[in-house]
Image (spheres, rainbow, N blue to C red):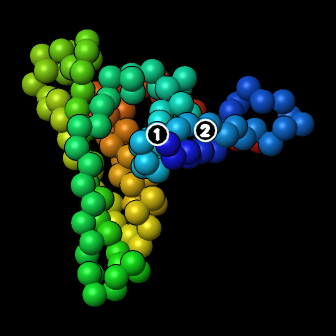
């Protein structure tokens, strides 16, 4: 298996700590490990992401003449399952969506497409409490 880690903020950390937490996960390849680490980081704050599944992942080389230095395009298709899928379907909204990202790094492009897919779900399917930043 491959391993990946995601660093994220944790408001419950002591002031002596830097407020950063690392989530590490193993997966079937680096992108699966990255997706699992991202899930570990986000699920405690956004439990509705548990119903979001990745159902297709495609990588395309954009400039093949550059060999291993080529830019890539990553497409990820997401799909809802469970109770949330029934609620979303009843509202006439789509149960699947696709995100796309591109760049010279397959890992960075995959991460961006994963985050975009999760953000889409949260913005389209979940009613979140308004966020009020604390200004000091």
| Viewer can see residue 67 | yes
Please tell me how crowded label 2 is: few (under 14), some (14-19), or many (20+) other residues with Cα within 10 Å: some
Side of 115 where 7 appears, left or right: right
Spot occupied by residue 17 in the image (x, y as percentages of width and height): 84, 38
Task: Tell me the element at label 2.
Answer: strand
Give the mark toward the camera: 2 or 1: 1
Q: Quadrant of the C terminus?
A: top right
Residue 96: quarter of image: top left
Across and down, in percent, residue 58 comes to 24, 55
Left or right of residue 88: residue 39: right
Residue at figure coordinates x 46%, y 39% from the top left: 27
Confirm or deny contact between disc 2 and disc 1 (CB under 8 A): no
Give the answer, above or below, for where 33 lies relative to 11: below
Name the quadrant containing residue 80.
top left
Tag on residue 27?
1
Mark 2 and mark 1: Cα distance apart in space: 10 Å
Return the x and y of residue 40 as percentages of the image width and height: 53, 30
Q: Element at badge 1? A: strand
The reply, left or right, for residue 9 in relation to residue 113 is: right
Q: Residue at x 14, y 32 (%)?
A: 94
Q: Residue at x 39, y 55 (%)?
A: 110
How crowded pointer 1 is (Cα within 10 Å; few <14, some 14-19, many 20+) is rated as some
Please state which of residues 26 and 72 is positioned toward the viewer in this rendering. Answer: 26
Find the residue positioned furthest to the front. 1
Q: Of the numbered discs in the image, which one, if any, rests on residue 24?
A: 2
In the visual, does 54 lie left or right of 136?
left
Say which of 51 and 33 sits in front.
33
């Amino acid at each position: 298996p491959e391993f990946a880690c995601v660093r994220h903020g944790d408001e419950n950390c002591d002031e002596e700590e830097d407020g950063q937490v690392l989530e590490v996960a193993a997966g079937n390849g680096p992108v699966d490990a990255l997706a699992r680490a991202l899930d570990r980081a986000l699920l405690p704050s956004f439990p509705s992401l548990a119903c979001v599944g990745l159902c297709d992942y495609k990588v395309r080389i954009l400039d093949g003449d550059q060999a291993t230095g080529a830019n890539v395009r990553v497409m990820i298709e997401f799909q809802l399952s469970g109770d949330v899928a029934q609620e979303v379907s009843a509202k006439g909204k789509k149960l699947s969506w696709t995100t796309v990202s591109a760049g010279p790094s397959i890992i960075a492009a995959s991460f961006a497409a994963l985050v975009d897919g999760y953000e889409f779900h949260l913005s389209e399917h979940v009613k979140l409490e308004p966020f009020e930043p604390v200004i000091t």
